Image (cartoon, rainbow, N blue to C red):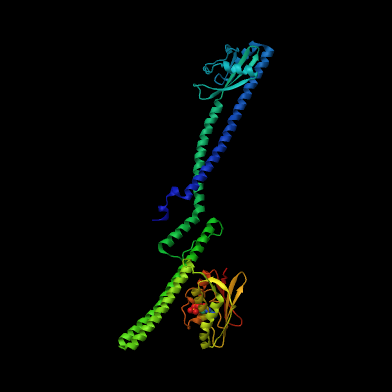
Amino acid sequence: MSLRNRINVPRTLAFRLTLWYAGIFLLSAAVAFSAFYYLITATIRGRTDQELLAEVRAFSSMMALQGIEAVKRQALLESHAAGEKQVFIQLVYPDGRLFSSSNMSYFHNIPVSVEAIGRMLEQQEPFFATVSSPDHRHEIRVVYALLGPGLIIHLGQSMDGLTRFIDAFKRIFIGTMAALFALAVILGWFMARRALAGVETLTRTAQRIAADGRLTERVPVGRGGDEIDRLAETFNRMLDRIQELVKGIKEMTDNIAHDLKSPLTRIRGQAEVALTSGGGADEYEAMAASAIEECDRLLEMINAMLFISRTEAGVAKPELGELNLAEVVRNACGLFQTLAEDKGVALTCDAPQQLAVAGDVRLIQRMLGNLLDNAIKYTPAGGSVEVALISGPGRLARIDFKDTGVGISAKDRPCIFERFYRGDPSRSLPGAGLGLSFARAVARAHGGDITAENRTPSGAVFRVVLPMAG
Ligand code: ADP
């Protein structure tokens, strides 16, 4: 089933973005249309009022100059000329009674409003009103104005032009809005899909990886440097890291399997030889002793691995007690003296009387032992190993292990603290590649660290720092 089929479209971001685009587009268009509509209708109404007012003025001056009969005649003439469906002109008394009227057959249900006359007389200026009648689809704009003492003119003009305009406007409005909405949806969908195409590629890649575990897959990264590109970059970086971690775990498993296999094969071989050769008790004893030795080495290795994993994960915490590091360092050097002498390496130790740290004495002993063992192991006969303990700056105890041995190659340097890593020159020497990773796990579990550097002209220096007690 394709990704597209499984997607619930109304819940997609693209769909919601499209709706937003379309909604905002439509709203803006509606606001613009409404403003235009309001402006046009207000202008048309204003113009009608101006025309009515001009008529009122003309009749007023005629009244003043030629008298009421002339006005009556003119009123009839004008309403006839304009069309009896367009305008009506009535002359009324203040109580609403008619003095004269144009033909009102079209406007028969437009009554004279006594209330409007009252308001006009009160305000002393022409009074406008919009009247609608059940017989007409359009409204009628009327004005009441005082022509002379006791005589009022009631003028009305049909607004059918405006009504026609509004009808046409509505049709255009609905048509345009529908077209605009369709356009907004198409545009919005297109834009949203374009913007989210990167996310979809990312999702597909993640799905492919989830389905068949191909960690080599990468998402194509665009050159725009936008949010999606950055997301893709981060996703790819995360994949790099996962791939690295998986590779590391695989290598570690291979190493563990390999390192467990050799001693087990040896134990099995010895047992087989003892059985088939039919030797005596001595031979069985030797076989058992050698098996115990191999098992001890295996257990030690497994324990070291467990310790490293647990301390790195923060699960195991050392039991901290105050101890004199100076004494522990001196004792460790003392223990390795014979080994160094046997190999022809001069081992010297320089430590003060007292230097207290909070630590787990057994772990620190093993850490020192590993570093001493390495220093002697990687230094040829005739060389020297100097161990120096000082109290460094920042309340840190510092132990340097300086040797004149083979040193660390540039290739090995970034990896020597990794589990099971063994440098090229050490292949022929005993060891499982766990010594340094164990030592560093111990130092870190105590809040310290270990670093390694090369010395000139030859050799290496391993520096341990541990926080001092108190
Ligand atoms: P092992 O000594 O069993 O190989 P370690 O974890 O103790 O494993 O050391 C890892 C690697 O670091 C070694 O294989 C070696 O290449 C390098 N190394 C450690 N100590 C020294 C040293 N003093 N001088 C040179 N190289 C060293």
- Residue at the spot 68% in from the left edge and 13% down from the top edge: 64
Residue 3 seen anywhere in this rendered image of the structure: yes
Residue under the image location 35 percent in, 85 percent down: 285
* Nearer the observer, 173 or 323: 323
Against 53, residue 271 (above or below) is below
Q: Is residue 231 left or right of residue 290?
A: right
Q: Does residue 46 appear left or right of residue 438 in this picture?
A: right
- Using the image as rendered, state which of residue 113 and residue 332 is in the foreground: 332
**Percent position of residue 5, x then y:** 40, 53
Where, by quadrant of the figure, is residue 457 drawn? bottom right
Q: Quadrant of the C terminus?
A: bottom right
Give percent across and percent down for residue 374: 52, 80
Residue 417: x %, y % from top left: 51, 74
Q: Is residue 377 visible?
A: no
Along the viewing direction, whichever of 397 and 410 lies nearer the viewer: 397
The furthest residue to the right: 65
Is 286 placed above or below 213 here?
below
Relative depth, front residue between 382 and 166: 382
Number of marks present in the image shown: 0
Q: In which quarter of the view is residue 77 placed? A: top right
Q: Quadrant of the N terminus?
A: bottom left
Relative to 281, does residue 242 appear above or below in the rendering?
above
Q: Residue at x 42, y 50 (%)?
A: 8
